[in-house]
Image (spheres, helix red, strand yellow):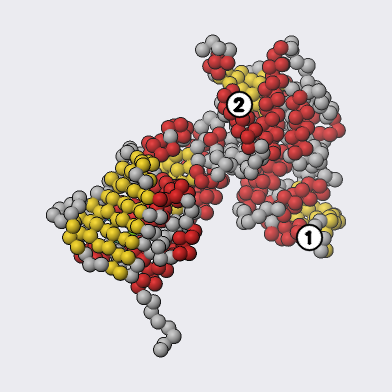
Amino acid sequence: MPRIQVLSDLLVNKIAAGEVIERPASVVKELVENSLDAGAEHIEIAIEEGGRRLIRVTDDGGGMDAGDLAMCVQPHATSKIRSEDDLFGIRTMGFRGEALPSIGAVSQLRVTSRQPEANEAYEIRVVGDRIEPVTATAGPPGTTVEVRELFFNVPARQKFLRTAQTEMGHITEQLARIALVTPHVEFRLTHNGRQVHQLRPAVGLRERVADFYGHELAAALLSIRREERGLSIDGLISTPADSRSSQKWQYLFLNGRFIRDRFLGHALREAYRGLVDPSRSPVIFLALRIDPAHVDVNVHPTKIEVRWRDSNLVYSQVLSVIRERLLGSDLTPRFDAGTAKRAEGERGRGGGGENGDPGAELAEERRREVRAAMAEYFKRTGAVPPPSHPAFGGSHASLSGAPADETLQPPSLADTAAAADLIARAADGLQASGQAEIDLLTAGRGEPLRDACDPAPEPTPVLQIHRTYLVSETPEGLMIIDQHALHERILFEQLVDRIARGPLESQRMLIPDILEVSADHIGVIETYGDTLQRLGFELTPYSSNTIAVHAAPTLLQEGRMREFLRDLLDKLAVRSGPASTELVINDLLSMMACKAAVKAGDPLTDAEIQALMRDRHRVERSSNCPHGRPTALRLTLRDLERQFKRA
Ligand code: ADP
Ligand code: MG
């Protein structure tokens, strides 16, 4: 007997089922996709015991005649493609002809179908490898597929099924992934006879999101739309204020099919970089449409991954449409006493839990203390005029960096805000504020920030309180600005601007500086050689634990360069996974900006304050600092009236 044999159909189907049918939700996906391919407008999904006992999908689509019914449970039998060419123009959800035979191999399957113009319905049953002949029966137009006792003959799979509730969760998620992009179709989902979801036909994505997740979320989302170079983008995105702690809230669809894609994922992260904290994710519903010939959907058995012909196009279009939308919106969070309290409550319960960001929490705590301090402030009369801050320079009033620790008076610990900031500073890992001074005159655009020709906004009176916050009048009310966060953002933007024009200015050493580092730093300078060069560093390995510094950026003051370089190498050494150069550069620039910016507790002169306020209007995304924390809170007159119980 030959050792090599062709597998039986049942075995082939079981193997296919292993890939395509992971759990009840996968059956729901395949059956509902078939209904959509058949042109259905009403789809009912009935589940019993989390799908273990029964999954039944009923549609009002085009149905099948007796001949097709006999064929549909055969492996590799499909009505959706005929030739190889069709593979590159897939417009249906299915095309592999695997679903029904796979399901039949691992359950008790019954398909009943009637074409709208036919007088009769037909039925076929499959149990394991037993396919029964088609019989005539009664039934309405459309198709009903019943799947009973899923995995009855695959004990390994059965063991992995979770509680009915968990499996229902997966099914509901699967329904979302389909129903969100088919708003015109009505869906009904029941579990053990009880209705779980009824999705009425909707006019569009926003209405469907409202139906599925509630009106509050749907109303808070910004819509985006663009059609360019053969790619159409239609979606809803959250403002940075509405970010979530999980990426689950990102739904990407391509030609009506839910997909995961690392290019798109990266584009989304880029679009929100600097606007949301890296540990949080925005809410995204994004429906892309592209000529099917420009994408290969046949790279994954469940088609959840695709291969783009032009991934750059997709990446850049998605990134730019979202960024334009976000930058065009006023992202300054509205101050809402209710939200603030709720947020505090949530943090309290979380107890700095899994997603707790100590930096953000401290910043929030500081903000909270200052809110209290503000009330106190208004009880007092007038503030002490603050002495000049060195970081602004005297006469040219530009954002230059004289060593901060030489002239800076230690902030008074009696000042709650300053005390909170001291903690925050320690937590931020800024061991000493003067550790790495950066001369921002050279880091900047080579021109003073204040350009006489720039039509500056009308100067409004601005008050510095607790040497930490700037309070200013706005047409709608008032705004409270975090001076450090804002300055950091301004410096960051200047550096980004500067580095786009070429490597930062660098100073060659007469004799290379030998720096002791740890062994993993040696690898870092090889991996990130180009990046370091753009920042103005030229480094080579010297021994197993030393490196030679041949050149360093001029903006780093001598003597401080070594500490800064170690920090920088540390940071790069702990980076995991591949990262684009831009991400790394931005990370490092934000580190520089953070160190050079005025701190909470730094007194500012009127001129310095006005400079900050003016630059606020000149920097992109100035409503958030590079770490994603907001730079400003806003309080409208209506909010004030509500607080004073006048409204
Ligand atoms: P595929 O969807 O990849 O073609 P399936 O195994 O899911 O493979 O289905 C096989 C065939 O059965 C389909 O091509 C289609 O012609 C037919 N079919 C399946 N479900 C339905 C349905 N609900 N209504 C009409 N025809 C269906
Ligand atoms: Mg199918």
Task: Give amino acid for label 1.
Answer: Ala
- Up/down of 383 relative to 389, above or below: above
| Structural crowding at the residue carrying mark 1, measured as other residues with C-alpha within 10 Å and reported as few (<14), some (14–19) or many (≥20) | few
Whether residue 616 sits left or right of residue 92 in the image: it is right
Task: Give amino acid for label 2.
Answer: Lys
- In the image shown, does 270 or 167 lie closer to the viewer? 167
Does residue 191 appear anywhere in the picture? yes
Whether residue 511 sits left or right of residue 582 in the image: it is right
Does residue 308 appear anywhere in the picture? no
State the SS at label 1: helix
- Up/down of 426 relative to 173, above or below: above
Residue at the location (77% across, 48% down)? 567
First of labels 2, 1 by sequence position: 2
State the SS at label 2: helix
- Up/down of 108 relative to 239, above or below: below
| Structural crowding at the residue carrying mark 2, measured as other residues with C-alpha within 10 Å and reported as few (<14), some (14–19) or many (≥20) | few
Label 2 CB, ligand 2: below 8 Å? no
- Up/down of 182 relative to 347, above or below: below
The circle drawn on residue 341 is 2
Q: Quadrant of residue 474?
A: top right
- In the image shown, does 389 or 181 lie closer to the viewer? 181
> Which residue is at the far left?
119
Picture coordinates of residue 371 (x, y %)?
67, 22
Residue at the location (75% across, 15% down)? 383
- The quadrant of the picture occupied by the N terminus is bottom left
Picture coordinates of residue 302 (x, y %)?
42, 59
User: Nearer the viewer's eye, disc 2 or disc 1?
Assistant: 2
Picture coordinates of residue 80 (x, y %)?
29, 61
Distance Cα–Cα, label 2 vs label 1 = 47 Å
The circle drawn on residue 519 is 1
Q: Quadrant of residue 440?
A: top right
**Total residue callouts:** 2
